[in-house]
Amino acid sequence: MNSISRRDLLIGTAAVAATAAMPSIPAAPAVTPAIPAWVVGTPGEFDWSFQVGKTAEEAIRNYVCETVGGDGCEDGDDPDCDCEWCYKIKSVEAERKPMWDGKHEDEITPGDWIRSGTGHTCSRCSYETFAEEGGHGVGREAVCAECMTLADWDIVDPEHAAELRAQAAL
C-alpha cells in the first residue's frame, strides 16, 4: 500500500485551492450580425442619408419617417394616395453600403461617403463632390478636385503627387 507523504498532501491541497480560486471563463458571447447599412435619397438630388434596415424597404421607411415625420400614411394602403408621406416613399431609393454595416451614423465621415462611391459636400469649399468628378476621401474629409493640395495627393495618390512635383520643377 502506498502511503501519502505530507508533501504530497500539501501539494494536492494547494492545487485544489488554486483551482477553486480561479475565475470561471465565460462563454463567448453570441455574435449578433450587424443590421445592414444603406444610403437613402432621391435620385439626382443631394438629400441622401445614412440609414439601417434589414431590407431596402425598411431603410426607405426609416428615412421617410425621419424626413417627413409620422410612421406611415394616414390613408392606409391606397396606391393612388399623393400625400407627402406616400410621395416621398415612392420617390426615394436605397443603395446598400456593406462597408458601413455595424457603424453608427456619427462614425461615418465625409471621406467615407466619397470612398463608398456616394457624393458629399467638399469639407473645404462646401460644393457637392463625387469621386467620378475628381473628389477624394482624404482622411476624414471629402475634398473636391479644385481643393486638392499636393499634401492631399501625397495621401491618396503618391505617384500623381510625384508627377505634379516634377512638372512644377520644370
Image: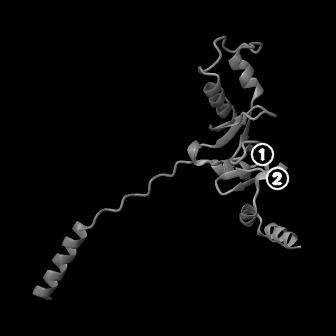
Residue at the spot 37% in from the left edge and 58% down from the top edge: 26
137 or 14: nearer the viewer: 137
Outermost residue toward the right? 170
Is residue 104 visible to us here? no
Asked if disc 1 and disc 2 are in contact, CB closer than 8 Å, the reply is yes
| Residue nearer the viewer, 116 or 80 | 116
Query: Which of the image's four quarters has the N terminus?
Result: bottom left
Placement of 5 over or under 56, stated as above or below: below
The kind of secondary structure element at disc 2 is: loop
User: In the drawing, does residue 113 fall left or right of residue 5?
Assistant: right
Between residues 34 and 62, which one lies in front from this camera angle?
A: 62
Looking at the picture, tell me which residue is in the foreground, 1 or 68: 68
The residue at which mark 1 appears reads as: 129
Which mark identifies residue 134?
2
Image vertical order of residue 6 relative to residue 47, above or below: below
Q: Position of residue 160 (x, y in %)?
A: 82, 67
Q: Determine the residue positioned at 65% across, 16% down.
A: 73
Which amino acid lies under the numbered mark 2 shown in the image of this protein? Answer: Gly
Residue 162 pos. (x, y %): 81, 71
